[in-house]
Image (cartoon, helix red, strand yellow):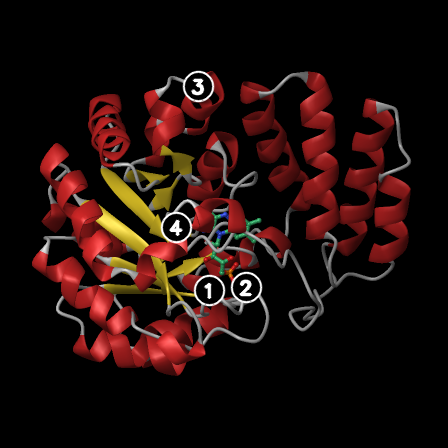
Amino acid sequence: MTPEKLLDSVKENPFLLAPMAGITDCAFRSFMRELGCGVVVTELVSATGLRFSSEKTKKLMEFDEVQHPVGIQIFGEDQESLDYAARAIEQMGADFVDLNFGCPVPKVVKRGAGAALLRDLVALRQVLRVVKGAVSIPVTIKVRTGWDEGQRNADQVAQVAADEGITWMAIHGRTRAQGYSGLADWKYIAQVAASSPIPIIGNGDLTSAEKAQRALKDSGVLGVMIGRGCLKNPWIFRQCRGQDRDRNFSALLERLLFHLEKRYDERLVFLQVKKFAAWYSAGYPDSAHFRRQLFEIKDREFLKAEIFAFFQKMESLPQADTSSEPFLMGGHG
Ligand SMILES: Cc1cc2nc3c(=O)[nH]c(=O)nc-3n(C[C@H](O)[C@H](O)[C@H](O)COP(=O)(O)O)c2cc1C
């Protein structure tokens, strides 16, 4: 896919699915595409892990045809591994390579990868050059606003990225030092978008369709990425695009099961369904009680019956806003 075509798909559907390690796997990405999201990206994959052929790493990179345009996200600092990984991604038929410069996790940062590269723009430029030189598909990047409050430099990163022919820069509107605390700084994202020579994708705290639509309209970004918001409201992408919220939980759960069963054995499907049901119940009456009950259930058929029964009762009820409650306050970007 050419950079122009990739950008056209964002213009067509500017609501992208944010990568979330351990969550946005192949099954989930297909499920979310069905539910209206735009471009998808895999969770971060270690370039070194891939070079040394870890089977687990390769599994993280799998995608289905329905997911196009799909990017594979890599992180690393070792140039040979990055070169190898980028070539492998192109060969696999992915549409673009996404580079992670936002991961705040100490294990990654200590190696000089992830968000650590935001503090060393010479090294960051070199990484971009290596990866761009390895492939003919587009290369995109995902960053934090900067290392910490005193070193917010996403604007400078955008300049370097533009020089090196990067197609877009996605910004999670927090510094590395912030982790997941505080709020994403959409004012700063708008500032970067105004001066950036390349398109910006904004990200952070878009927990409702209204917030996502407003952020898209007000901040001058080409698109927005939604992560945690779609874990509590699976219809958020449909709503972002002005489609009615489909309140049919039974149909939704059947599709979730369909995607999970395609990829996982019964034991894992069982665990994953519990996880999603717990998230989807947020903001509905008696959800705390429902969640406690869920995790005690050992029988698969009973679990399914309980989940379907709970959500059937919720279909006509509004979901309360729980966005001020801490939710998944750690991740790789
Ligand atoms: C559990 C979890 C895992 C994450 N894994 C990744 C990842 O692999 N790569 C990445 O670039 N960002 C990762 N992130 C960051 C998200 O893509 C996103 O930037 C962040 O959650 C803020 O957006 P949100 O408020 O819409 O969730 C992760 C976030 C969470 C919560």
Which residue occupies the foreground of this view, 120 or 52?
120
Q: Earlier in the sequence, mark 1 or mark 3?
A: 3
- Label 2 to label 3: alpha-carbon separation: 28 Å
User: Does the CB distance between marks 4 and 1 fall below 8 Å?
Assistant: no
- Mark 2, residues whose alpha carbon is within 10 Å: few (<14), some, or many (≥20)? some
Residue 14 seen by the camera: no
Task: State the residue position of label 2.
Answer: 179
User: Does the CB distance between marks 2 and 1 fall below 8 Å?
Assistant: yes
**Residue at horizontal 41 percent and vertical 22 percent from the top:** 58
- Mark 3, residues whose alpha carbon is within 10 Å: few (<14), some, or many (≥20)? few
Amino acid tagged 4: Gly
- Label 1 to label 3: alpha-carbon separation: 28 Å
**Residue at horizontal 41 percent and vertical 67 percent from the top:** 147
User: Which label number is shown at residue 114?
Assistant: 4
Amino acid tagged 1: Arg
User: Which label number is shown at residue 176?
Assistant: 1
